[in-house]
Image (cartoon, rainbow, N blue to C red):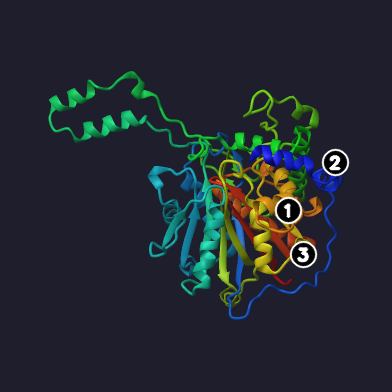
Amino acid sequence: MAFMLKQSARCLPTASRLVIRPISCSSHLQAPAVQAKTKKTLAKPGVKNIVVVEGVRTPFLLSGTTYSDLMPHDLARTALQGLLNRTGIPREAIDYIVYGTVIQEVKTSNVAREAALGAGFSDRTPAHTVTMACISSNQAMTTGVGLIASGQCDVVVAGGVEFMSDVPIRHSRKMRKAMLSLNKAKTLGQKLALASRIRPDYFAPELPAVAEFSTSESMGHSADRLAAAFDVSRVEQDEYALRSHLMAKKAQDAGHLSDIIPYKVPGKDTVEKDNGIRPSSMEQMAKLKPAFVKPFGTVTAANSSFLTDGASAVLIMSEEKALAMGYKPKAYLRDFVYVSQDPKDQLLLGPTYATPKVLEKAGLTLADIDAFEFHEAFAGQILANLKAMDSDWFAQNYMGRKTKVGAPLLEKFNTWGGSLSLGHPFAATGVRLVMAAAHRLKKEGGQYGLVAACAAGGQGHGMIVEAYPQ
């Protein structure tokens, strides 16, 4: 399929192929003027309106930095406490807690429960943990939406945490089997006999990798092939990555990243901002060697998201309950979809498949969207998705659609930075995307936001966020 995609990209009409043009970063840094919108609401008769009251996150930090001595539930607990402090909601008012995580710490396998207890929630408040790769907190949020929509709950806290500074490293399978057998041995003789069978190669550890179980291919390698298939050049990828960092730095300096809560790390300084935002230059980025496909690949450390530690949390309610408790919601959570496709050649194309489906479900078009917040796993992945979305050929041959959905305007796209610059704690990113969309809509006077993300396993998510009337 990769060959077919590359051939098709070369055959696209010129106008379509040049949608993802080399990006002049400075020309896209101006914030859109605030303008009043008169679009209809997406409220549906007989369907509960579900709202986001508030969302927070710890600063997202490069793994191996200030958070390195913590555990995942420490970050999750901090996000939950920050949400309680910012909203002032009584702990006992929370009906349910859903949290996402990807690289699981075995000591706290249900991290939602451990973090909730640590944050002082009632031991009578149920909590469970979900995992869906990079869309784990998206799944946590929509699980909360389902609980509220079905009448099971009125108030749900959702979120996600990822801690890449201390991932589980296992003994080899041979060693694990030997140790389990030793544990079951009854006599000294049995133990000595089993121990004598252990060989030096048993001690080789199994290191975790960001790779697909079904294909054994790393996500970076897949991104490199995807960029090649859609003729996304190294220059285009570096320019997009630089744009992300410049946008994030401008948003950080302007105070737009207001979902961040300061975190006093025990024994260390208080962390108040993301530390991965590092605007560079095209010249410096061009010096980096390919990270995955060597020596001719185009994906590098500079145009990829980095391993990140962080946690997020969001307070979701029925609109009726929120107003009864005296809250002014930030946004409505409207229609959402999950998609899955081939994890080999279409691993990172989730946004392409999710966007037209969620727009149709909501009765909207691409032109109706005022703020796009897409997860940036790699610059090449983002640009390939935008080209796929703007290709009639791809829509007809791979999506079973008559026409393309179109590519979002960059002036509306990730204008406060994205995962390439802000960081990507796998299970925490979904909440960041939703809160960025909600805050941008309020600041820019827009009404509809579209959140989309890809995930390991060839899966993806799309959701419509509607601004709450000001």
Q: Position of residue 129 (x, y in %)?
A: 45, 54
Residue indicated by mark 2: 24
Residue indicated by mark 3: 368
Crowd class of label 3 (few under 14; some 14 to 19; many from 20; radius 10 Å): some
Residue 50 versus residue 209 in the image, above or below = below
Q: What residue appears at the point 82 percent right and 69 percent down from the top-left corner?
A: 36
Q: Nearer the viewer, residue 143 or 214?
A: 214
Q: Residue furthest bottom?
A: 46
Q: What residue appears at the point 54 percent right and 49 percent down from the top-left corner?
A: 427
Which image quadrant: the N terminus?
top right
Tag 1, which secondary structure? Answer: loop
**Disc 1 marks which amino acid?**
His
Q: Position of residue 381 (x, y in %)?
A: 68, 42
Residue 432 versus residue 151 in the image, above or below = above
Tag 2, which secondary structure? Answer: loop
Residue indicated by mark 1: 256
